[in-house]
Amino acid sequence: MIGDDRRNDGDFVDEVRAVLDAQTLAPDLAERLAAARRRALTSVDVPSLRVPPSWVPAGALATTLLTVGLTVAIDNGGTPPLDDDAQIATVEDMDLLLDLEFVAWLDTDNVDAG
Amino acid sequence: MSNAAALNRYLAGVEQRAFRMARYAVSDVDEAMDIVQDAMLTLARKYATKPEAEWPPLFFRILRNRITDFHRRRTVQRGIFAMFTPRDRDDANPIDLVSDGRAAEPEFRTQLDAAARRLDGALAALPTRQREAFLLRAWEGLDVAATAQAMRCSEGSVKTHYSRAVHTLRERLGDDWP
């Protein structure tokens, strides 16, 4: 392309690129670059397998046992165990009943006779 | 293909051009080597999971930042005059610095080598922004948008720097080049 006045910018840039590409690095420099690349690649994060937290297996086991226990209880015709509130209400009802019976007994003639 | 394999392929294809760009900018083989190594390390650590299409502008932005860091350190060391490009502060001939030792072997000075040396000298003499825009566009093949991303400037600035670089190179190399 010597002395070609008609050379446009595109042709000029193509020639620049060709000359740049034709240059090669000295082997020792190329090897240093390759070694640097290998070192860099060792720092790439490898996606690790997700390990569940240690409490997850214990929680799963407890849930399973509770579910199995309730299922067996219902299948055997039993009533599900009452929760604490239900148990307290039952005891209080019983006390009230006994109190009412006591008051009724006081109203009877048996007391006057005593 | 895993990220590491894809990144290896990308870096293997770009590392020599990146090194030579860094060497144009800092005029020192070892400094250029450190800069490229650091840029590769940063890309691998922080951006390996990004889509491959995003790697080129990211990599060259990192490279450019490292070159800027180098010049900042030099500025502190040498004073305000070190802020200028290597041609203004360096006694060494930039052509010799980029000729890979072949200048010492006259028998290998083919026409292509002579053309390459003239080109290297002209590139090294370009203002930094013009050289960056020209090499990223013409040699690395980045489009205007990616070049702007790498250089942290507007696309209009990229076009201006590139156009001026082509004009300056043509003027300095002359019509008889290569």
Image (cartoon, coloured by chain):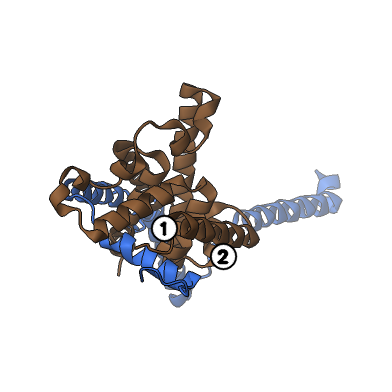
Chain colours: A blue, B brown
In 3D space, how far apart are the residues under numbered discs 2 and 1 (Cα atoms)?
58 Å
Q: Is residue A101 left or right of residue A107?
A: left
SS under mark 2? helix
The quarter of the picture where the C terminus of chain B appears is bottom left
Quarter location, residue B49: bottom left
The quarter of the picture where the N terminus of chain B appears is bottom left
Residue pictured at 16% horizontal, 48% vertical: B106
Residue pictured at 42% horizontal, 43% vertical: B25
Q: Is residue A23 left or right of residue A58?
A: left
Give the camera-side residue of B62 and A16.
A16
Q: Chain of mark 2?
A: B
Residue position marked by numbered label 1 in the rendering: A62
Dot 1 alpha-carbon crowd within 10 angstroms: few under 14, some 14 to 19, many 20 or more: few
One can see residue B50 in this view: no
Give the camera-side residue of B165 and B107.
B107
Give the camera-side residue of A56 and B116.
B116
Residue A76 pos. (x, y %): 43, 75
Residue A22 pos. (x, y %): 26, 62
Q: Are marks 2 and 1 on the same chain?
A: no
Q: Indicate the amino acid at tag 2.
A: Ala
Q: Give residue B145's mark.
A: 2
Q: Give residue A20's mark.
A: none
